[in-house]
Image (tube, helix red, strand yellow):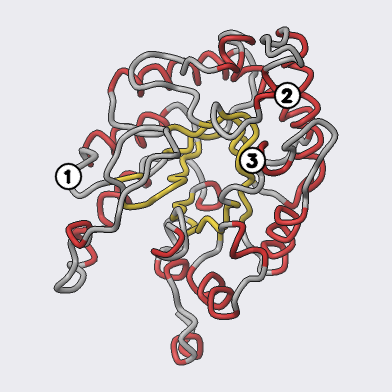
């Protein structure tokens, strides 16, 4: 490692894991409005990958028909390009934070399958096409798999049916052939859920559906998930030819995909009040699991959901 960089205090997590995977952070819209100098220095020092927290989601960028707001998303992408970051687009299709007008007509009735597919096509082509190859990877479908129950029941699924994910990936490919596209999931220790994901990935690959990766969210607690089961998922997705990202690493005291759930800060959530443990006891499982994934470092990343406690 560069001695001058050490002396200048520029060595961060991205350097420590430089031979293993990219280290990313999710940046919230409030920070992007006017990024404080100390945060910019922190992000630049510690990370080489970034995800927009909320402001690429449908309700923020396209809240009403004919109304679009690109301001924060554009600033985010410009920042990532300027800092030579691996930029992740988040997210195109999700059961949450999608306005009701996408699923309902003016009378409040569900729109037709054809109408919803057209909305998905227009949204994907517009959002992905705006930034083209400046974004390295897209979370195309988010949290579409339930805990051991197959596809998540949502307005998307209710109207489009079980071809939802397939249609989303095909529309993404038509919008830009270059970026990696992935589906992201919540807890990844449920064996039935893991088997379901591997099954549809293999079916997609056989039919030429362009899925390149699995994003494993990392909302973890002190007592879960079972690291062995988590490793099994990394290994299973890698064996299926998928690039693996851990997309939302954060301390969490809840399992699920309901974003309105919130908790007060608690000292019991800090297991390291007497200092950090030996590096091997913390990072060895991740290093070992990622070594089984047949993909280059450029296709693997661990992203922290929030740069600091204030916005995590």
> Marks 3 and 1: CB-CB under 8 Å?
no
| Residue situated furthest front in the rendering | 107
Answer whether residue 287 is visible to the viewer in this image: no
* Vertical position of residue 13 compared to residue 27: above or below: below
Residue at 19% from the left image edge and 66% from the top image edge: 272
Answer whether residue 235 is visible to the viewer in this image: yes
The label nearer to you, 3 versus 1, is: 3
- Choose the circle earlier in sequence order: 1 or 2: 2
Residue at 74% from the left image edge and 31% from the top image edge: 124
- Rendering coords of residue 289 (x, y %): 32, 44
| Residue situated furthest right in the rendering | 66
Instruction: Give the residue at mark 3.
Output: 57
Total tally of numbered discs in the picture = 3
Residue 301 is left or right of residue 129, and the answer is left
Instruction: Give the residue at mark 2.
Output: 120
> Picture quarter containing residue 44?
bottom right
Instruction: Give the residue at mark 1.
Output: 223
């Amino acid at each position: 490692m560069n001695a001058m960089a050490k002396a200048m205090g520029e060595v961060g997590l991205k350097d420590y894991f430089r031979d293993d995977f990219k280290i990313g952070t999710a940046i919230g819209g409030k920070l992007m409005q006017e990024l404080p100098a100390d945060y910019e220095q922190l992000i630049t020092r510690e990370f080489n990958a970034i995800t927009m927290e909320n402001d690429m989601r449908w309700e923020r960028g396209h809240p009403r028909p004919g109304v679009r707001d690109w301001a924060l998303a554009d600033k985010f992408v410009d920042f990532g390009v300027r800092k030579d970051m691996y930029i992740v687009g988040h997210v195109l299709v999700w059961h949450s934070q999608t306005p009701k007008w996408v699923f309902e007509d003016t009378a409040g009735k569900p729109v037709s399958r054809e109408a919803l597919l057209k909305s998905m096509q227009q949204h994907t082509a517009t959002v992905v096409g705006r930034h083209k190859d400046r974004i390295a990877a897209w979370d195309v479908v988010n949290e579409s798999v339930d805990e051991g129950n197959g596809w998540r029941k949502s307005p998307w699924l209710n109207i489009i049916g079980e071809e939802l994910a397939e249609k989303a990936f095909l529309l993404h490919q038509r919008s830009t052939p270059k970026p990696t596209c992935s589906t992201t999931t919540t807890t990844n220790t449920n064996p039935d859920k893991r088997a379901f994901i591997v099954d549809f990935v293999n079916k997609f690959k056989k039919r030429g559906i362009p899925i390149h990766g699995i994003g494993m969210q990392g909302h973890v607690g002190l007592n879960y998930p079972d690291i062995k089961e988590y490793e099994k998922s990394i290994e299973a997705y890698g064996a299926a030819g998928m690039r693996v990202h851990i997309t939302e690493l954060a301390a969490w005291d809840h399992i699920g995909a309901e974003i309105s759930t919130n908790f007060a800060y608690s000292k019991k959530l800090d297991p390291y009040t007497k200092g950090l443990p030996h590096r091997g006891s913390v990072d060895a499982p991740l290093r070992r699991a990622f070594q089984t994934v047949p993909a280059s470092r450029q296709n693997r990343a661990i992203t922290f959901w929030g740069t600091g406690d204030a916005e995590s």
